[in-house]
């Protein structure tokens, strides 16, 4: 199998944290998004979605969603599970993955891609070009702050977002907080003490190699 990615971009960054935590080695090609490598025909002939990351399996099967790539990899590399081991853990982690993606990640992407001049005519990723809608940049920032408040409240009664242990949902949240800082100039306030404490705890758990 082969992974096409660009580690510093937000969605690839989620996958990189997952892969590094699990200690998996994969044949990987970095595609320079700063040079629009994801739109080059040499890539779109393999991955017509024109997004990163993408995992192409040996039989040609193409996985283009981070959560799907993570599920595939966890299936073949079950050690250090990040997607749950019981039915309820699996359900809850996926629940939070979708919720964080739809609320925080999409809000941040909306704010960034509809407000930054570099994305004029490219407001959405993928093979089609879409014009920016400036009002979405403002709405995105407001949704992002609402989302951070919601997560702060959720974290009042548990150490990690999907329960007692680090999971892929925590990785989603760490990635979007980095994305929000540089792309939407949005950070949690000091008053969001449960979110700030979680961030330190999750970062330490992610880098704990014991
Ligand atoms: N839902 C996809 C999102 C993939 C995505 O949008 N990736 C961005 C990089 S963070 C991309 O490929 N952008 C291409 C572009 O902007 O042209 C996933 O889960 O991986």
Image (cartoon, rainbow, N blue to C red):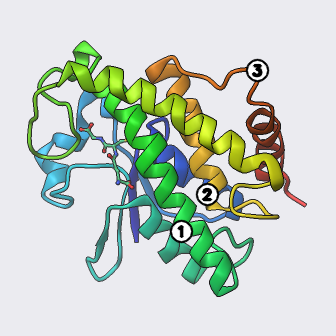
Q: Which residue is mark 3?
A: 190
Q: Is residue 51 above or below residue 80?
A: above
Answer left or right for 169 relative to 146: right
Residue 113 image point, x, y percent: 28, 27
Residue shown at the point (43%, 59%) measured from the top left? 66
Which comes before the other along the chain, label 1 or label 2?
Answer: 1
Of the two numbered discs 3 and 2 on the same chain, state the one appearing first in sequence. 2
Residue 158, x across and y down, in percent: 81, 56
Judging depth in this view, the residue of 138 and 71 nearest the camera is 138
86 w.r.t. 139: above or below? below
Question: Considering the image in quadrants, where does the N terminus appear?
Answer: bottom left
Q: CA distance from mark 3 to mark 1?
A: 28 Å
Residue where numbered disc 2 is placed: 169
Q: In the image, is 205 to the left or to the right of 13?
A: right
Classify 10 Å Cα crowding around label 2: few (below 14), some (14-19), many (20 and above).
many
Give the position of the C terminus as an image quadrant.
bottom right
Secondary structure beneath label 2: helix
Res 200 quadrant in image: top right
CA separation in Å, label 3 and label 2: 22 Å
Residue found at the very far right of the displayed protein = 210
* Residue at the spot 27% in from the left edge and 49% down from the top edge: 51
Instruction: Estimate the x, y position of residue 41 in percent, counting from the top left.
Output: 11, 47
- Write the residue at 74% across / 71% down: 80
Q: Nearer the viewer, mark 3 or mark 2?
A: 3
Query: Label 1, on which residue?
Result: 94
Q: Is residue 149 left or right of residue 192?
A: left
């Amino acid at each position: 199998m082969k992974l096409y990615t660009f580690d510093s971009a937000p969605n690839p960054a989620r996958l990189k944290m997952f892969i590094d935590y699990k200690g998996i080695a994969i044949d990987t090609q970095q595609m320079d998004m700063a040079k629009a490598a994801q739109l080059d025909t040499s890539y779109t002939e393999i991955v017509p979605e024109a997004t990163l990351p993408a995992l192409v399996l040996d039989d040609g099967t193409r996985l283009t969603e981070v959560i799907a790539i993570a599920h595939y990899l966890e299936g073949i590399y079950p050690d250090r599970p990040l997607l749950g081991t019981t039915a309820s853990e699996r359900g809850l982690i996926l629940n939070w993955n979708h919720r964080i993606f739809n609320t925080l990640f999409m809000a941040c992407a909306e704010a960034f891609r509809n407000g930054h001049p570099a994305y004029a005519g490219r407001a959405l990723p993928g093979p089609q070009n879409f014009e920016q809608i400036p009002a979405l940049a403002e709405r995105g920032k407001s949704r992002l702050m609402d989302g951070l408040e919601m997560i702060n409240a959720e974290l009042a009664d548990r150490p990690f977002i999907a329960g007692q242990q680090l999971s892929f949902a925590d990785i989603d949240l760490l990635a979007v907080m980095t994305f929000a800082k540089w792309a939407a100039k949005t950070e949690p306030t000091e008053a969001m003490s449960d979110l700030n404490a979680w961030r330190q705890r999750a970062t330490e758990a992610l880098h704990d190699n014991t």
